Image (cartoon, rainbow, N blue to C red):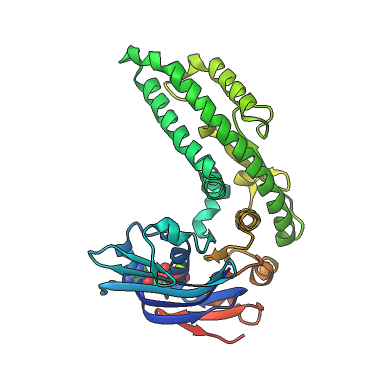
Amino acid sequence: MYIETIALQGFRNYKNAVAEFSDGINVIAGRNAQGKTNLLEALFLLCAGRSFRARSDKELMGFEEDEAKIEARGESAGREKRLKIVLSRGKRRQMLVNSVKQKTVETFAGNFSSVLFCPEDLNLIKGGAAERRRLMDLAICQLRPRYAAALTEFNRAYENKTRILRDWEEKPALLELLDEYDLRLARMSAELIHYRANFVEKLALEAAKIHGEFSGGEELGLTYSTVKTVEDPKGPAEEIFKAVMEHQRQHREAELSSRLCLTGAHKDDIEITVNGRTAKSYASQGQTRTAALSVKLAELEIHRGQLGEYPLLLLDDVLSELDGTRQDFVLNRIGKGQVFITCCEDEKVAGRTGGRVLTVEGGNVFASGQ
Ligand SMILES: Nc1ncnc2c1ncn2[C@@H]1O[C@H](COP(=O)(O)OP(=O)(O)OP(=O)(O)O)[C@@H](O)[C@H]1O
Ligand SMILES: [Mg+2]
C-alpha cells in the first residue's frame, strides 16, 4: 500500500502544490510553520476520512478559500486507486474513489490505512492510564468489530452504574437497579479484558523486538494490568466474568460509601518498563520517545498481520531528542511499508537517509534529490 502522488489545492497553507513520493521512506524537511504537519494531515485524511487534529472541515480549508481539494493516486490491495476529497464552505464534502462518489466515511476510509505518531503520543509513556486504554481501544476496534460493539455496551453500563452510585443516597430506589448493572458491567468487562490481554501480549512481543534494535539493546516490557481477582486475563470470558463479579462483591460496600465505580475494565492499564524500571517515572526524554515509537511500530506489525500489507506510517517530529544512532534507525530502518517522517531543517538529514527527501517551504513541496 502506498501513495504515489498527492495534489493539494486550498488545503490549509497549500494553495496549489503537487508532491511525488517514494514507496519506501520519505523525509519531509523544512523550517517551522511551512506545512510539514499539514502535509501529513492530508495523507491521514485520505486514509481515515477524518483529520487527527481539526474538529471541523472548515479548519482544513485555506483561510481565503471557498473550496479545498485533496487528490492522490496510489496502490492498495494490488490495485491502483485514485482518491479525491472536495471540501466547500457551507456544503457537504465530497469523497471519491476512482471517480465513484462515496456515501460514507467508512467506505472511503476502507481503501488506505495508516498509523500515525505525533508528539502527543509521548503521553502513552508519561501520561495517565486513560492514554493507554485509548491505544488499546482504537487499535482493537479496527481489528475486531465485536470489540467495538462490546466497548459501546460497556460504556453504557458504566455510565448507568456510575449514576446509580452517585445518586443513591438521594434516590434510594435506584439501588434496585444496581445488581443488574453489576452484571452487565462484569459481562462487558470480561469481553474487553479477554481481547485486551491477547492484544497486549502480541504488542509486547513485537514492541520489545523493535525496541531492542532501535535502542541498541535496551529492554522494553509491556504488561497488561486489570481487575485484581482475574488470574488469567487471556482465558475464557466466562472465567473472567466470575472473577470480576467476585471483585465487585468484595467492593460493594466501598463502592456505596465512595459513590464510585471501583471494579471493571475502566481501570485497566498497561505497565511499561525500560530495562525493568517503570518508564513513566524513570525514562529519559529519548527513552520515552523510543519506547512510544516502538509501541506504535508494533501496532503497525499487528495491522500488517491483519491486512496482509503495511499501512502507511506517518511520523510527525520524531527525530528531536534522539541521538544519532536512534535517528539513523528512524531514517533508514524504520517500518517496511511506505513511511513519511517530518523533521526540522536543522536536523540535516540529507545524506543520512536512503529515502527520498522532500523540502516544504511556504506551502510548496520541492524534491531535494536523493
Ligand atoms: N486553514 C488554514 N489556512 C491557511 N493556513 C493555515 C491553516 N491552518 C494552518 N495554517 C498554517 O499553516 C502553516 C504550517 O502549519 P504546519 O502545522 O504544517 O507547520 P509545520 O511545517 O509542521 O511546522 P512545525 O515545524 O512548527 O511543526 C502554519 O503557519 C499555520 O498557521
Ligand atoms: Mg509540525
Q: Can you tell me which quadrant of the image ligand 1 is in?
A: bottom left
- Picture quadrant where residue 76 is located: bottom right
Q: Position of residue 263 (x, y in %)?
A: 53, 25
Q: Position of residue 359 (x, y in %)?
A: 50, 81
Most foreground residue, 270 or 11: 11
Quadrant that contains the N terminus: bottom right
Q: Residue at x 67, y 35 (%)?
A: 234
Q: Residue at x 57, y 80 (%)?
A: 357
Q: Is residue 217 above or below residue 1?
A: above
Q: Position of residue 26 (x, y in %)?
A: 58, 75
Q: Is residue 359 left or right of residue 224?
A: left
Q: Going by the picture, which residue comes out furthest to the front?
A: 100
Q: Going by the picture, which residue comes out furthest to the right?
A: 217
Q: Is residue 70 left or right of residue 232?
A: left
> Could you tell me how many numbered marks the image carries?
0
- Picture quadrant where residue 122 is located: bottom right
Q: Is residue 159 above or below residue 65?
A: above
Q: Position of residue 123 (x, y in %)?
A: 53, 50
- Picture quadrant where residue 67 is located: bottom left
Q: Going by the picture, which residue comes out furthest to the left?
A: 90
Q: Is residue 272 above or below residue 218?
A: above
Q: Residue at x 45, y 19 (%)?
A: 180
